[in-house]
Amino acid sequence: MNTKISQNFSHNNEKVGVSTKLMINASLVLSVLCGVSSCTDEIENEIVENNAKMQELDESDGTLRLGKKIPNPYSLKVVQQAYDELAEKSGLRSRETLAPTHLYLKFAPKNLEEVKLLESDTTLFFYSYPLDVELIGEGGGYHDPSLPDTVPTYQYVCVPIDHPLPEVEYEVLDEVYYEEDEEAELRSGRAISWEQLEEKAYLLAGDSSIISTSETRGSKQWRAGGRLRYEDNYTNTVVPLEGVPVRMRYHIITYQNCTDKSGYFQCSKTKRGDCEYSIEWKRDVFRIIPENKLFVTADYVIQENKSRVDKIFRKSDNVKQWIYASLFIPAHEYFYKDMCGIQRPEKNIDITPKTRDDDNISGNCAPFRPKEIRIFRYYSKNKEKNSASYYGTTIHELAHSAHCEYIGILNFIFLDDNVADTWAVGVQDYCSLRKYGEYGRLIAHNSYGRQYTGLVNDLRDTGTEDILFTDGLVNDGVSGYTLLDVQKALTNATKWSTFRKQLKLVKPIDNETSKKIDALFNFWATY
C-alpha cells in the first residue's frame, strides 16, 4: 500500500527502466482509420540500416553455413535399392516396387504473408536450409545467398504424400520412403522388415551411425533427447528453459518435443542413427524474429553429442542466441503461465530484438501494429540490458499488445499515455516480483513517474511487498485489487478520469475507500 517516490536500481547500479514510445501522429491515425497503412518501406530501410551492425555480431555469434551435400537414406531410390539388394540376398522371388510415402519439397514464398501461411500448418516442420547438406557452425539465421535480404528465403520440408499443401510456389526435390511405427508393424510379417530396410538404406547412403555407436547405444533403438538451460546474468544462476520446441531430425525426417519445466526434452519415437538437434524460437502463438532477417523465425542448430544434448545458453558464448532465449522466457510465461485471468495477446505475435541504441528506447509496441513487438538491446549507447530487464521489458510490451486487443485498436490509438503505461508497468511489476522475489521491485522499473505510475501495484499490494523500501514511501491506504479487477476498469477507459471512475465500479467500496482512490489517482496525476 505504499507509493514509491524515489529511484531504484538493479544489481551493479544498472538502471532498469521502461521508456516505451507509442509513436502516434495524425498521418498514422489516418492510415489506420483508412486501412491503408504499409510497413514495406520501413522494413526494407531497417534491413539496410541494421545489416552493418548485425554483421559485426555475426562474426562472433556463429552464423550457420552449408557444407557438402549428404546422401539421403530415405530417398525412394535408395530405399528401393536397399530392398532389391536384401531381396536378392534372401532369394525372394516376389519383389515389391515401393511407392513414395513422403515428398521432400522446396517452397519459394514471395512475401511475409506466404511465410506465415506455411507456418500456419503446425504439423509440418519447415527449415530455412536444405535438409540434405552438411551444416557448419553452431548457430542459425541462414538465408540463401542467391536471394536478397528483402525477400524470404526458401523453405524446405518433408510432407506425407497425401498432405494438403498451401498455395505457395514449390518444387519437388525428392520422393521419400519412410515407415512410421504402425506401418512398420504391417511390414513385420514380411520377409524384409523395416528395421532391416532402414539399416541397409543408411549404409548405402554412407551413414554408419545406425550401427556404429556400440559404446553408447549398441544396435538397440534409443530416444534422442537432452536438456536446455539459460544463464540468467541478473541472478548469476543457470535456470531451465521451459517450453522450447526442439527438433530432432534424422536426415529429412523430423520429430519435435518441447522442454519441460526442468528443461528436459525427449523424442516420442525410439530410433537408431544420429540425429540433428535444432531449435525454433517460437510457439504456436508467438515467434522471435532475427533483426536482420525479418522473414524467418529465429532458429539454432546445436552441434553437440548426437546422442544427448546438454546446452546452456550463455551471453559469452553466443549473444544473439542468448537474447532470443531472454525474450522467449517472458513470452512463454505470458502465454502459457498463470496471468491471473487477464487478457493475453492473440496469437501471431512477432517479437524482434533491436540493436539500435540512439533513441534511448527500451521497447516498443506501436498502436498501428500491436502484434509486432520490438525489444531494444541498449538503454543508451553501449548500455546493455541484463536478463531481468529483457524479462520486464518484454512483459511490458506484451501487456500493451493485450491491452490493445482488450479495448480495441481505435480506443488504444487515442489512449492517454499514463493509462497505457500504468497498466503495462503494473503487469510488469507483478511478473517481475513473482519471478525475482524481493528483488523484483528493484528491476521492474528505474522509477515511477506521471506516465509510468505505480498505481496498479498500489491497488494490489498490502504493504508487505514494500518492506525493503520504507524510505521515501507514502501509505496510500488502498489494497485488495487484483490484476483482473484493474483490467475490468480499463474497459473503454481512454482517459485517467474514466479509469478512476470505472475502478470504483469494479467491486463494492465505502466512501472512505472511494476518497483514498481519488487521492491515489490525484497523487500520480501530479507526481
Image (cartoon, rainbow, N blue to C red):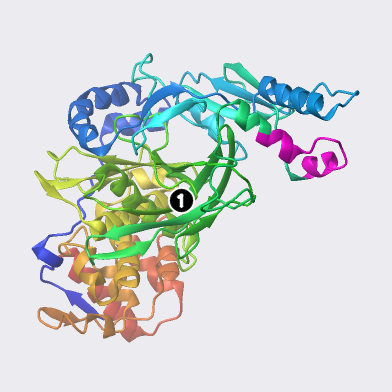
Quadrant of res 280 = top left
Residue 65 appears in the picture as rendered = yes
Identify the magenta region.
Answer: 182-199
- On screen, residue 472 above or below 226: below
**Quadrant of the drawing holding the C terminus:** bottom left
Reply yes or no: does residue 359 show up in magenta: no
Q: Main secondary structure of the magenta part?
A: helix
- On screen, residue 16 above or below 377: below
Reply yes or no: does residue 190 show up in magenta: yes
- Classify mark 1: helix, strand or loop: loop
Location of residue 370 in the rendering, given as x and y in whole percent from the top left corner: 39, 42
Residue 527 appears in the picture as rendered = no
Location of residue 140 in the rendering, given as x and y in whole percent from the top left corner: 37, 35
Observer-nearest of 134 and 300: 134
Observer-nearest of 438 and 231: 231
Task: From the viewer's perspective, tell me whether residue 183 is left or right of residue 376.
Answer: right
* x 42%, y 44%: residue: 281
* x 18%, y 71%: residue: 523
Q: Amino acid at mark 1?
A: Pro
Mark 1 surroundings within 10 Å by alpha-carbon count, few (fewer than 14), some (14 through 19), many (20 or more): many
Location of residue 131 in the rendering, given as x and y in whole percent from the top left corner: 51, 28
* x 49%, y 28%: residue: 115
Q: Which residue is mark 1?
A: 345
Observer-nearest of 409 and 114: 114
Location of residue 242 in the rendering, given as x and y in whole percent from the top left corner: 45, 59
* x 40%, y 69%: residue: 483
**Quadrant of the drawing holding the N terminus:** bottom left
- On screen, residue 410 above or below 135: below
